[in-house]
Amino acid sequence: MSARFCSLALRLLVLFALLGSAASGRAAEVGPEQVIRDFYRWYVDALVVDRDPFEARADLQRYASERFLKEIDAQRASPDGLDADPFLSAQDFDKEWAKNVVVSELAIKEKRATAKVELKGTEMSTQLKLSLTQEEGGAWKIDSVEPK
């Protein structure tokens, strides 16, 4: 009986290891368009409930490159601070933006991608130009945001 138990336990460990590696492989397969959609859904939802997304550093690091986050940190710490939200290029937002992310003109060249993004709301909309970089391991991260 203990041999059967060990065999079953070993099979379960192998299954979980295979499932875990498949899940991590899928994370690398998420394309830039989906990263943009997922990011703005998370980011705007945080703003809607009055949560500072910059306090959720691990979540920001999942979506934005370390280079871009350091650039934002430097601007936030400067005497002038930020003129606008660095991911929205705006001083205000519409809560509907989380549900209405329109990605267009996506272009991928090697490990860089660019896209036009429109965040549509009931009271206001904004248009952005995003650049993304594909990091080691294959994950796409937002590397710059500019108003369009």
Image: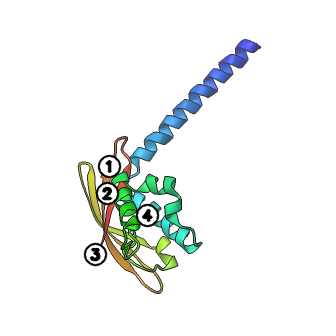
Residue visible at 38% across and 69% down? 86
Disc 4: CA contacts within 10 A as few (<14), some (14-19) or many (>=20): some
Regarding mark 2 in the picture, which secondary structure is present there? strand
The answer to whether marks 1 and 2 mark residues whose Cβ atoms lie closer than 8 Å is yes
Image location (x, y in percent) of residue 101: 42, 70
- Residue occupied by mark 2: 132
Of the image marks 1 and 3, the number of the one nearer the N terminus: 1
Q: Quadrant of the N terminus?
A: top right
The answer to whether one can see residue 80 in this image is yes
Distance CA(mark 1)–CA(mark 4): 16 Å
Regarding mark 1 in the picture, which secondary structure is present there? strand
Left or right side of 132 for 48 = right
Regarding mark 3 in the picture, which secondary structure is present there? loop
Disc 2: CA contacts within 10 A as few (<14), some (14-19) or many (>=20): many
Q: Which mark is residue 37?
A: 4
Q: Residue furthest bottom?
A: 123
- Residue occupied by mark 3: 148
**From the viewer's perspective, is the residue at label 4 or at label 3 nearer?**
3
Distance CA(mark 3)–CA(mark 2): 16 Å
Residue visible at 28% across and 57% down? 113
Distance CA(mark 1)–CA(mark 2): 7 Å
Residue visible at 45% across and 52% down? 62
Q: Judge whether 23 appears above or below 38 on screen.
A: above
Image location (x, y in percent) of residue 53: 51, 64
Disc 3: CA contacts within 10 A as few (<14), some (14-19) or many (>=20): few
**From the viewer's perspective, is the residue at label 4 or at label 2 nearer?**
2
Disc 1: CA contacts within 10 A as few (<14), some (14-19) or many (>=20): many
Q: The disc labelled 1 sits on which kind of residue?
A: Gln
Q: The disc labelled 4 sits on which kind of residue?
A: Arg
- Residue occupied by mark 1: 134
Of the image marks 1 and 4, the number of the one nearer the N terminus: 4
Distance CA(mark 1)–CA(mark 3): 22 Å
